[in-house]
Amino acid sequence: MNENEALQVYIRSRKKDYYKGPAYSITSKNDKGVFDILPYHANFITLIKETIVIDQDKKSQQKIEIKSGVLSVASNRVDVYLDL
């Protein structure tokens, strides 16, 4: 994955940083169902629940179990604030 094509992802709670770095995609769930965030996604903000999956590349991923959180996307950057 080209660094210019990657999402820049920051996932944190008040007490801990869970992930900071590039990602190929992000998958999570909101009240409407499961959704994906890919590079150059439109500006977006939503409440999330249950899990968030970070695809660091096409072969490796990290899954974080969550209670709830807020996810926002702007300018190829994803910020997630968790309430674990």
Image (tube, grey):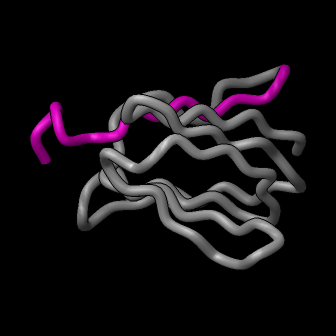
The percent coordinates of residue 37 (x first, y second) are: 46, 57
Q: Position of residue 46 (x, y in %)?
A: 73, 50
Q: Residue at x 33, y 36 (%)?
A: 22
Assign the C terminus to one quadrant of the image.
Answer: top right
Q: Residue at x 37, y 56 (%)?
A: 38
- Residue 19 drawn above or below residue 27: above
Lateral position of residue 36 relative to residue 1, left or right: right
Q: Residue 61's x, y, as percent? A: 41, 60
Q: Residue 50 appears in which quarter of the rendering?
A: bottom right
Nearer to us in this view, 72 or 17: 72
Image-based side of 74 in relation to 84, left or right: left
Q: Nearer the viewer, residue 60 or 51?
A: 51
State the residue at coordinates (24%, 65%). 58
Q: Would residue 3 be counted in the magenta stretch?
A: yes
Q: Nearer the viewer, residue 7 or 21?
A: 7
Q: Is residue 28 above or below residue 80?
A: below
Q: Residue furthest top?
A: 15
